[in-house]
Amino acid sequence: MSVLRVGMVGYAFMGAAHSQAWRAVNRVFDLPVRVEMTTVCGRDGDAVAAAAQRLGWQSHTTDWQTLVARDDIDVIDICTPGDSHAQIALAALAAGKHVLCEKPLANSLTEAAAMVQAAASAAGLAMCGFNYRRVPAAALMRRMIADGRIGQIRHVRAQYLQDWIVDPQFPLVWRLQKEKAGSGALGDIGSHIVDLTQYVTGQRITGVSALTETFVKERPLPTASRGLAASRDGASTGEVTVDDAALFIARLDGGAIATYEATRFATGRKNALRIEVNGSLGSLVFDLERLNELSYYDSAAAEPGFSTILVTEPHHPYMDAWWPPGHIIGYEHSFTHQARDFIEAIATGTQPEPSFDDAYSVQLVLDAVQQSASSGSGWTHVRGGAVSAVRRTVEAAPPPVS
Ligand code: SOE
């Protein structure tokens, strides 16, 4: 069996989730390639050494520039805050590596476009980590919509609700700083429901009308123990420069209309992602807090009513690799599925999805939402198409493995 040597940059929440996936993927799925967790990279030498030990990496480094250029690395997995995605991805693609980059793809359209362009001409393959596509029930939702089970799509109703910054004393962490995170709830969790919509419906969002709000505009600076710098001028608070919540309506190119709500101020809602699609023949509902289930309404049924599909059968997406029917799975499995799909794409030389093009289409929506909200001018068209319409099937794939 050949080997795919991974170098991962970043080791916090997403780094831990990706590590779990790299550790598990060959034990669960029968793949032509074996993953080697070669090196993890982070800025703090002691912390990254501890992370390597805890997460199962063979070695660690503080120098991502050297890491991406190394001959003994095939894949760069980017799990850093958004302000470094473009820099790392561009260097890794230039060095011929395959790249998996956490969502949202970048902090700005300009950076995202550069990443798409680099990916289009690179030897390596590039994918963005919208992991919720890989929850079996979400993948089943897409399959059922593609099979015409709910007919012509009329409505999409999507929400992603969290509450971790309701307390005004919660510190000004990087996710609340525009220069680090690009945007707030919009990019962090709104991007997931935009991607999920486009994935399950197969339709693209063409226009939006939006409003955003920052409820708490000033927050205490994080203490050094949280790994973040205190202000140089001695101030104890700083400005929140991102949105706390983003609401928008949208049109899709297949004729559907949609509503979106992404907020970190939905008190009591910890990580509540829900997407409902209503079609001419029925409806489908996915709720992350019940991720093994898919709710289905079939108007042609003898006794129509919402029924629950328990998505644990071997014929359901990804489930044949796991447990007997009825034995449920969880959040981290979506990352294992993501790793599986990425590895298979590399092994077969096909473009993994979501590609950087797909992720760019999400960025275009985020950008339109921000424009609509900041100008207050209402309807805003999502700028046309992907930077490169190229969906590559890599004919002469680079040797993917060592
Ligand atoms: C934080 O809001 C976060 O970790 C997101 O960044 C993830 O993408 C989401 O899966 C859970 O919430």
Image (tube, rainbow, N blue to C red):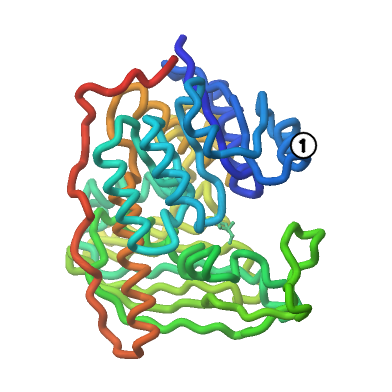
User: Where residue 127 sits in the image (x, y, percent)?
Assistant: 38, 41
What residue is drawn where x is 72% and y is 45%?
A: 44
* Relative to 106, 392 lies left or right: left
Is residue 173 depicted above or below 237 in this figure? Answer: above
- Establish if 225 lies above or below 248: above
**Quarter occupied by the C terminus:** top left
Using the rendered view, name the quadrant where residue 27 is placed: top right
Q: Position of residue 28 (x, y in %)?
A: 54, 24
Q: How many marks?
A: 1
> As rendered, which of 103 and 225 lies closer to the eye?
225
Q: Residue at x 30, y 30 (%)?
A: 123
> x%, y% of residue 178?
52, 70
The amino acid beneath tag 1 is Ala
User: Which one is nearer the viewer's eye here, 69 or 365?
Assistant: 69
Q: Residue at x 48, y 16 (%)?
A: 3
> Ligand 1 sits in which quadrant?
bottom right
Q: Is residue 181 above or below residue 148?
A: below
Q: Check the image and name the residue furthest to the front.
A: 233
Residue 268 sits above or below residue 115 on the image: below
Using a 10 Å C-alpha cutoff, classify the residue at mark 1 as few (fewer than 14 neighbours), some (14 to 19) or many (20 or more): few
Could you tell me which residue is drawn at 32 percent across and 52 percent down? 114
Q: Residue furthest top?
A: 1
The residue closer to the viewer here, 317 or 218, is 218
The residue where tag 1 is placed is: 50
Instruction: Tell me the quarter of the picture where residue 360 sits.
Output: bottom left
Q: Is residue 47 left or right of residue 128?
A: right
Q: Find numbered disc 1 in the image and state the secondary structure of the residue it sits on.
A: helix
Residue 202 appears anywhere in the view: yes
